[in-house]
Image (cartoon, rainbow, N blue to C red):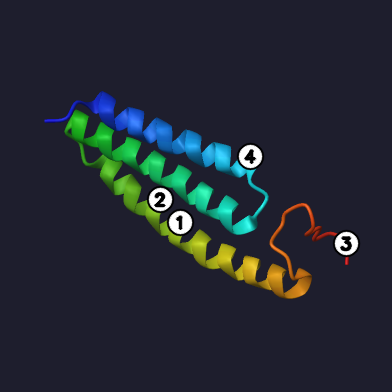
Amino acid sequence: MIPIQHYLVVAAALFCIGTAGVLVRRNVITMFLCIELMLNAANLTFVAFSRFLGELHGQIFVFFVMTVAAAEAAVGLGIIVALYRNRETLNVDDANVMKW
């Protein structure tokens, strides 16, 4: 059996990679994927603790997080497509939504 520390290290690494991607990258799609990576790191942590404690609450919570992530992906990609059609760029610095 793999110890919980290994799962937590992998989850922390995924979360750090996602955070660095959001802070460093300027492409909206890349930032969006990094946010999804951060959600998956949180899900991995929930599942690891759920298995470690012998409870199913963490795994049930993961299903809710996955549902919210799927809805976020649908709405987020719709906004990204609309942004690209209006601005013809996916760069965050070039796409100022408040000014038309």
Q: Which residue is mark 3?
A: 99
Graded by Cα atoms within 10 Å as few (under 14), some (14 to 19) or many (20 or more), the crowding at tag 1 reads: few
Residue picked out by circle 4: 23
Task: State the separation of the CA atoms marked 1 and 4.
Answer: 23 Å
Circle number at residue 68: 1
Do tag 4 and tag 3 residues touch (Cβ < 8 Å)? no
> Which numbered disc, 4 or 3, marks the residue closer to the eye?
4
Residue 50 in the image: above or below residue 85: above
- Mark 4 is on which residue type? Leu
Please state which of the two labelled residues, at mark 3 or mark 1, is closer to the viewer: 3
- In the picture, the disc for residue 6 is none
* Mark 4 vs mark 3, CA separation in Å: 23 Å
Label 4: how many Cα within 10 Å (few below 14, some 14–19, many 20+): few
Considering every residue shown, the one lying at the far left of the view is 1
Going from the N terminus, do you reach mark 3 or mark 1 first?
1
Q: Gap in Å between the C-alphas at discs 2 and 4?
A: 23 Å
The image quadrant of residue 21 is top right
Secondary structure type for disc 2: helix
At label 1, the amino acid type is: Val
Q: Secondary structure at mark 3?
A: loop
Q: Amino acid at mark 2?
A: Val
Q: Find numbered disc 1 in the image and state the secondary structure of the residue it sits on.
A: helix
Task: Determine the residue located farthest toward the bottom in the rendered image.
Answer: 85
Nearer the camera: disc 3 or disc 2: 3
Q: Position of residue 79 (x, y in %)?
A: 64, 67
Mark 1 → mark 2, Cα distance in angstroms: 5 Å
- Mark 2 sits on what residue? 65
Residue 50 falls in which quadrant of the image?
Answer: top left
Image quadrant occupied by the C terminus: bottom right
